[in-house]
């Protein structure tokens, strides 16, 4: 089978040795050809798919596929698979736990006190007294929700489809989740339904003093509305890993905002060492005439 590796973001040298060793009978290429059957892609060059007339499967090298779905050359009749990377799921869980505990244990406040040389103990809150709302209960959101429930937090989840997870309460009403959550974690896919979902109305529904963690997509948050919610102290702190425009422009107010913890889209990175077996398994499924794991519903957008 002829396989194309096409990415302006991922380094072929990190992937191809692993893939070539696992699939010795297949051939890998870095440029489009008429006889390519599988395309492994992450931010491929514009027009790549238009040069692949015999394509049988598109395998994303990332879990997020919103940019691929907006590529006009993406063939709609060809299966598109998002990557289910165990390493990325573990990393995302670690990142969210770190942010939740930083806020819950008031370390963000103690950092402020340290800068002012203030020695003052703040009231301690138990995990069971906090409700954490998870927007999105896919592979990432479910793992995060279960980890938080294990630590004793009250966890409330919201997603388009009902998910039954031990220790996690589900609601189909976004407003209910926002009203009940001391801290909201956004792990939604980016679709036309979720674009700008965290806006002034959403922040107003959250309890006064709540916290936001956005590790989904920057377009989920209306940045102007979040800034106003932070300035008014209605939202005490925001942990932001993704932004509408990346890299974040140098003059953006979030860089120096005292109520924002900012990271450069590093909450969870795809790791070839844990991801390549999933890609190999999907190629073998294709060879057997089966559908790939992580098949994308292009109508739903994920």
Image (cartoon, helix red, strand yellow):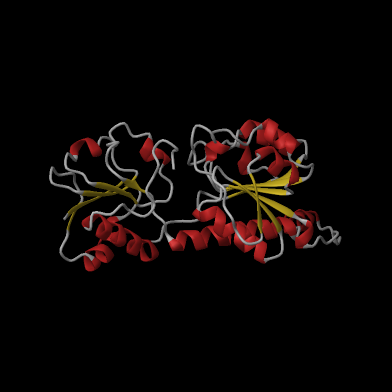
Q: Is residue 236 above or below residue 274?
A: above
Q: Is residue 203 above or below residue 266?
A: above
The answer to which image quadrant residue 76 occupies is top left
Image coordinates of residue 65 in percent, x first then y, are: 40, 44
The answer to which image quadrant residue 19 occupies is bottom left
Figure quadrant of the C terminus: top left
As rendered, which of 265 and 148 lies closer to the eye? 148
**Residue 250 visible in the shown view:** no
The residue depicted at 64 percent of the width and 33 percent of the height is 199
Q: Is residue 146 left or right of residue 24?
A: right
The answer to which image quadrant residue 174 occupies is top right
The residue depicted at 13 percent of the width and 46 percent of the height is 35
Image coordinates of residue 61 in percent, x first then y, are: 35, 52
Q: Is residue 210 left or right of residue 42?
A: right
As rendered, which of 81 and 95 lies closer to the eye? 81
Figure quadrant of the N terminus: bottom left
Image coordinates of residue 238 in percent, x first then y, are: 66, 46
Image coordinates of residue 83 in percent, x first then y, are: 39, 54
**Residue 59 visible in the shown view:** yes
As rendered, which of 40 and 281 lies closer to the eye? 281
The residue depicted at 77 percent of the width and 54 percent of the height is 109
The total number of labels drawn is 0
């Amino acid at each position: 089978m002829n396989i194309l590796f096409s990415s302006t973001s991922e380094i072929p040298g990190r992937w191809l040795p692993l893939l070539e060793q696992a699939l010795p009978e297949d051939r890998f290429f870095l440029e489009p050809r008429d006889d390519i059957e599988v395309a492994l892609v992450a931010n491929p060059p514009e027009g790549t798919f238009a040069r692949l007339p015999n394509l049988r499967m598109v395998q994303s090298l990332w879990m997020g596929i919103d940019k691929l779905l907006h590529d006009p050359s993406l063939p709609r009749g060809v299966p598109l698979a998002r990557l289910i990377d165990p390493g990325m799921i573990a990393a995302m869980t670690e990142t969210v736990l770190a942010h939740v505990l930083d806020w819950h244990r008031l370390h963000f406040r103690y950092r402020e006190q340290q800068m002012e040389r203030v020695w003052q103990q703040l009231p301690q809150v138990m995990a069971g007294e906090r409700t954490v709302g998870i927007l999105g209960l896919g592979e990432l959101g479910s793992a995060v929700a279960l980890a938080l429930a294990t630590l004793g937090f009250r966890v409330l989840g919201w997603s388009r489809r009902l998910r039954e997870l031990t220790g996690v309460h589900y609601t189909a009403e976004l407003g209910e989740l926002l009203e009940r959550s001391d801290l909201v974690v956004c792990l939604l896919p980016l679709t036309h339904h979720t674009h700008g979902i965290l806006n002034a109305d959403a922040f107003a529904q959250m309890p006064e003093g709540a916290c936001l963690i956005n590790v989904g997509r920057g377009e989920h948050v209306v940045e102007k509305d979040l800034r106003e919610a932070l300035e008014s102290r209605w939202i005490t702190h925001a942990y932001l890993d993704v932004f509408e425009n990346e890299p974040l422009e140098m003059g953006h107010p979030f860089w120096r905002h005292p109520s924002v913890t900012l990271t450069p889209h590093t909450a969870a990175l795809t790791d070839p060492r844990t991801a390549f077996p999933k890609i190999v398994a999907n190629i073998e499924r294709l060879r057997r005439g089966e559908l790939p794991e992580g098949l994308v519903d292009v109508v739903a957008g994920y």
